[in-house]
Image (cartoon, rainbow, N blue to C red):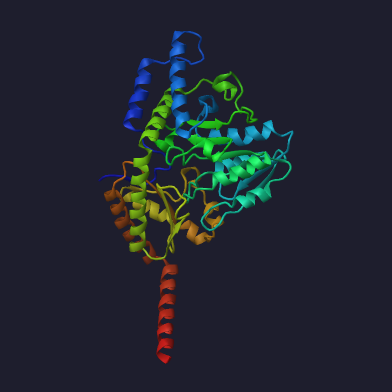
Amino acid sequence: MKVINLDYLASNPLLPHVQEAMIEAIRKNYGNPSSQHQIGDKAATALAKAREQVARLINAPSEKEVVFTSGGTESVNHAVKGVAFANADKGKHIVTSNIEHNAVLRSLRALKMMDYKVTSVPVDSYGRVNPDDVAKAIKDDTILVTIMHSNNEIGTIQPLAEIARVTRERKVIFHCDAVDSVGVVPFDVQKLGVDLLSFAANQFYGPSGVGGLYIRRGTRIWPLIDGGVQENNKRAGTENLIGIIGMGVAAELAVRDMDARLLYARELKERLIRGLRARIDDIFINGHPEFSLPNLVSVSIRYIEGEGVVLMLDEEGIAVSTRSACAAGALQASHVLLSIGRDFADAQGTMVLTFGITTTEEDVDRFMDVLGRVVQTLRGMSPLYAKAKQAAASSARLAAAEGGIR
């Protein structure tokens, strides 16, 4: 039985070209890019090429503005804490949103213990931030605004360019967590106007454990890791050259294939949403209908528990998630879903479906067929669903009776 992966957000598979490039790099036994000899020079050349490839993916003005990290989480921590530490003399106030990833939220929680203050702006029912709310939240001592590009649980994309205009006018540094966006949708740091951008290779078919942080020239930021002078003095430690080479190739392929990937993902998403609505009643499709990731569908199914669905689908060889892998195992309801107005019960009955270039229409159709049976089974055991159906039937009879009286 073929295993169907609809949890691409946890990690994408390595593309064959990426695998080949990394294997070739291993066989060539690259040295340390900081070494002052011909072996080091060879490694430094490979590192520089990868940096140029990644810079092109986000349209960075200079490849020197790209710092390689161990992944999206480190990039976010570096951006948020590094700006806070470097600009503490200017102020200790930070603005964020209610639906940020835990990498941002927990970085801010650590800063609060150091007497930094945080204002979190709300989102609408689609999960969108209003730039006016950001403007109102900024104070004289605000040093950083950190707003994600796309949400990892509902897929909603934020109006970054509008928010950036606010931060530029107020001379506040703007960081964007774009881990789930870069390499998936077109991203241009110059047009969007961000000062710092966090992203990760494993979201665009590169290796896990490798990420990037774009730092606009002139942005005040401290390195989090002390030691050598690697990464233009921004991040100490010998670079993960093999992984970075893989990231560079993945970035180059993402630029080349972006249009085709976008078209295919949108077709699959439309097919998936149509099928869900046709097969299952009492569902909500979360996120913005227009401004959202093309490879993500968040669906809240009433009168069931999401973990039960995940386990039953797994027995059928279908992998899905109830939320991002970084938050899996948390017992509390998703703060993202609560922020857009879902109640605790509906939040617990939510699945996050993500797919990629190896997902087929047949995979989507099989998933929906199996899901329909799973939901029917679980609802058959749910007293809440039985009561809801009884109430609906009673309302229908009453409405029919009143219509007859008239």
- Report whether residue 168 is seen: yes
Residue 273: where, in percent of width, then height? 37, 56
Q: Camera-side residue: 143 or 313?
A: 143
Q: Quadrant of the C terminus?
A: bottom left
Quick check: 227 left or right of 275?
A: right
For the view shown, which residue lies furthest in the bottom direction?
Answer: 405
| In the displayed structure image, the side of residue 145 where residue 250 appears, left or right | left
Residue at 46% over, 12% down: 41
Q: Is residue 205 visible?
A: no
In the rendering, at what x and y percent does residue 228 appear? 58, 18
Q: Position of residue 93 (x, y in %)?
A: 70, 42
**What is the residue that sits farthest to the left in this orientation?**
1
Q: Is residue 208 left or right of residue 144?
A: left
Rendered position, 379 above or below 362: below
* Residue 297 vertical position relative to residue 284 in the rendered view, above or below: above
Q: Classify residue 341 by image quadrant.
A: bottom right
Residue at image point 64% right, 34% down: 83
x, y (%) of residue 157? Answer: 50, 48
Which residue is painted at 35% across and 17% down in the image? 27
Residue 72 vs 397, above or below: the answer is above
State how many labels appear.
Answer: 0
**Corner quadrant of residue 104:** top right
